[in-house]
Structure formats: C-alpha cells, structure tokens
Amino acid sequence: MALGAATPIIAPPKPKNARSKRAAEAREPVAVEKGGKTAIIVRSTSSSERVKVALSEINQLKKPHSISFSKANQIRPFEDSSSLQFWSAKNDASLFLIGSHNKKRPHGLVWARCFAGEVMEMLEVGIEEVMAMSGFKGIKSTPGSVPLFHFASTSPHTSLWDTHPTYVQFKSILLDFFRGVEMDAVALKGLERVISVTIGGDAAADSESAQAGVEAAVGNGKGKGVESLIARNGLGNESGDYDEDKTLPHVHFRTYTVNFLRSGVPTPLVSLSPHGPHFTFSLRRSQQPSAEMWKAALKKTVKKAPTNTKKNKNVDVDEMGDKVGRIYVDSQDLSTLQSRKFKGLKRAPEASTEEEGTVEGTSSGGGGRKKKAKTAPEAEE
C-alpha cells in the first residue's frame, strides 16, 4: 500500500513476539514501492462466461503478484466498497479487478485502486471482445515478466490519452496494474512481451459515436458528452459515480511476444507475434479520486543533503582512489609493555661470594644444570 494515515476497517492485532512484529512492519505503507503490487481478482455472484475468461487471462498476465478468489462474492463496488477495504487490509493488496454481469451493464470489469487502505478510484469497462491466450500458437512468455506498454490512438482521437480524464485514468491504472518489480534498466534479451493499447480502430463505430456526442452537445447546449466531462472534473455528481458514456471510442488491448532475428549487426531485428490475450473494452462508469487523496498519493519524499558536514582534515584520497587517513598516537613507555614471558629471558640470580667457582654442565640428554667444581688439594711444601 501507499503512504497515508487513514483509519483501517479492522484494527491490526498487537504483535506478540519479534517475528510477528517484523511481519507487521513489512506490511506498513511506504513512500515508494519497488516491488510488484498485489492485485486481487474476484467475480461477483452473477458473471458470464466472457467475464470468467477475461479474469482468468488477466490473472495469467499478472502472476505471481495476483490473488484470485475461487468463490463468487456478493459485491457491488460502486454502491459499497467496504469489502474491498477489508480484503485490502487482510491481503496487503492495493489493486482490484472485479467481474460482473447484469442486464443493464453486461460483461463488466471494474478496475479499483486503493490508497492507505481506502478505495481511491474505480473505473468500469465493458468487455466487447475477448480472445484467450490458448487460441494463439507459439511459445508463451515467462510468468512475472514486465511487459513493455505502447499507447496509441487513431487519427480522430490522437490526444485522448493525455486530455480526456477517463482515458488518462485508464492509462494510469493499467501501468500501475502491470508495473511489476521496479528496475533501473532492462536488457534487450529480457524483453519478452509487448502490450499495445489503442483507442479506436473501428472507423464506422467511432465516427457514429463521435457524431452522436457532437449532436447531443450542439442540440441541447449541455448534452451527454458535455455532462460527462463536467462530472469527471468534479463539477457535477459529487459522489463520483457516473453513468455509462456510450460516445467514447473503444479501447483495443493487444498482447504480443517479442522475437529476435538475425540482422547482420550487433542489434538484432525485432518482430512481434500475437501472444494473447486480446480484449476490446468500452469505457463506462468512473469514480475519480478526491483532490486531497490524489495529492497525498503523489507525494514524494526528497532526501535533503546535510548542510553541517564537518570535513575530516586527516582523511584524503590517494592517486589510486583509495581513502587514506593519518592517525596521531602518543609516545608509549615500552618498559611497561606487557609481553610474553620466556624462561630463557629471566635474569640469573647474583652469584654467592662464598662459592669460588661454578661451572655449567651439560647432561647427556641435552639439558643443563649447575654443578660445583671440585678443588684440587693444596700442594705440600
């Protein structure tokens, strides 16, 4: 989760030992997350076969940073998001993908993103078309590999990725959902998958939807297209739960695998082949984050350089780049130095004045001991 100070739905238990304390500290929010974010994939009690296939395929792309619930749950995220907050705190997850199906909004997927244990934003899309990964031949990419994203748009919608709030939100959620582990650089051989997300493509359908939006805006002065933009900018519905806008063009989600071919130069020739899955989404309801929460989510901690740094006068760097230092030591009295004592270094006791002479004798075993020398008898006169 990201950094924040929100009150959790369930109070975390107090750690009883050092192991549980370390586990609780590892789950605490951090300012910058370098690892992959965990996503929870769940389906509601009413879901179609198309929704089940889509959830399964996206789960394959997200692995190993995904948790898929096997049982269906009674959940309506736009009406009540308490279940999402509970699962977020329980599983330490900040991303959700909910599949549902009903008569009013068939084959729907809801992308949700949490911040500090609370639901920050949600976006609902409709699945117009889905092609499973099993329908494409060839070698599949390694699970957990970070994909390369390519965002494009057809000529009538060239600037929607940067100007329209719903498309900007969808682009941000997709990048956050599939970001994986943060890396400084990627080797060319390590790139296995490319995901291309394109706005438009079906010229007839896109021109009809765009024409309907223009007619609604011109005819009524404040048509459906204008109302959707006002609502997304926070000037309309304060709750952030908006109805479906059918005038927006479809989004085509395509996955490709990267093939490297010989080119005669050090840089190989790159070709793309369909990998799957393929989706066609239609944008529906969206809930934008509040200004305060969005500002807190984008907050970055900048490390300030220390100003009062003392320079060490006795530390320098030599020509080889090694750090050298000069140490000053007071003069020592070596006579008081405690050293190892040897028997041969002991001083011999002073010779007795009564003894006239001593001779050191050597035994046959090599040992030495002192013996008295016998004196010759005095000569008779």
Image: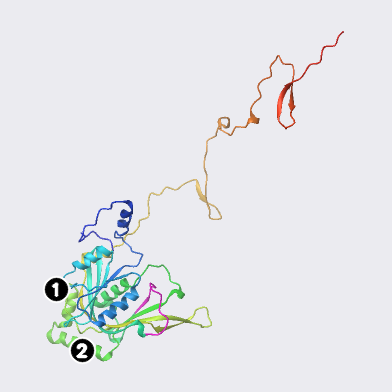
User: Dividing the picture into quarters, in which one does residue 361 lie?
Assistant: top right
Residue 289 marker: none
Q: CA distance from mark 2 to mark 1?
A: 25 Å
Residue 199 vs residue 262, the one in the foreground: 262
Q: Residue at x 52, y 42 (%)?
A: 327
Residue 165 vs residue 253, the one in the foreground: 253
- Judging by the rendered image, the residue that carries numbered circle 2 is 211
Name the magenta segment's main secondary structure: loop
- Judging by the rendered image, the residue that carries numbered circle 1 is 237
User: In the structure shown, which secondary structural element does the residue marked by tag 2 occupy?
Assistant: helix
- Residue 380 at x, y percent in the picture: 86, 9
Query: What is the image's colouring?
Result: rainbow
Q: Residue furthest front?
A: 364
Q: Amino acid at mark 1?
A: Asn
Read off the magenta span. 136-150
Q: Residues within 10 Å of mark 2 (few under 14, many from 20)?
A: few
Position of the N terminus, as image quadrant, is: bottom left
Q: Residue furthest right?
A: 381
Q: Amino acid at mark 2?
A: Gln
- Residue 215 at x, y percent in the picture: 17, 88
User: In the structure shown, which secondary structural element does the residue marked by tag 1 occupy?
Assistant: loop
Position of the C terminus, as image quadrant, is: top right
Is residue 148 one of those drawn in magenta?
yes
- Residue 337 at x, y percent in the picture: 56, 32
Question: Can residue 62 be seen?
Answer: yes
Q: Is residue 359 above or below residue 93?
A: above
Residue 155 vs residue 283, the one in the foreground: 283
Q: Residue at x 71, y 24 (%)?
A: 370
In-image side of 123 versus 377 (left or right): left
